[in-house]
Amino acid sequence: MKKARYQIYTIGAASYFQFNFEPKRGNQLGSYLDIGVFGGYNFGRKYSQTLKIGKEKSVYTA
């Protein structure tokens, strides 16, 4: 076997929220509540290998 490759196709998204509970809101340290959400989906995969036998080259894809 000359080369093997396994590819995974995915898509994802993330969202982030930060809430400040201090009455004075400026560039300062304070009390915060952080909430984050992430989601992803794998929608495809592909395996391929390249074989070299002698001087011939063949590609196998599954």
Image (tube, grey):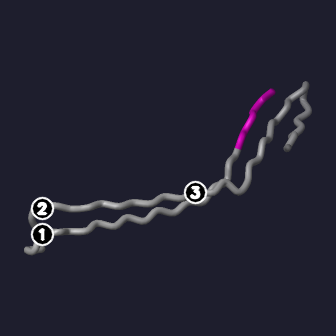
Q: Secondary structure at mark 2?
A: loop
What residue would you read off at disc 2?
30
Residue at 11 percent of width and 68 percent of height = 27
What residue would you read off at disc 3?
40
Nearest the eye: 47 or 23: 23
**Separation of disc 1 and disc 3 at Cα?**
34 Å
Residue at 12 percent of width and 61 percent of height = 30
**Amino acid type at mark 2:** Gly
**Amino acid type at mark 1:** Glu
Relative to 22, is 58 on the left or the right?
A: right
In the rendered image, the quadrant that contains the N terminus is: top right
Picture coordinates of residue 3 (x, y %)?
75, 33
| Occupied quadrant, residue 33 | bottom left
Q: Secondary structure at mark 1?
A: loop
Tell me if residue 49 comes above or below residue 41 in the rendering: above
What residue would you read off at disc 1?
22
Residue 51 falls within the magenta-colored stretch = no
Mark 3 closeness class: few <14, some 14–19, many ≥20 residues within 10 Å: few
Image depth: mark 1 or mark 3 in front: 1
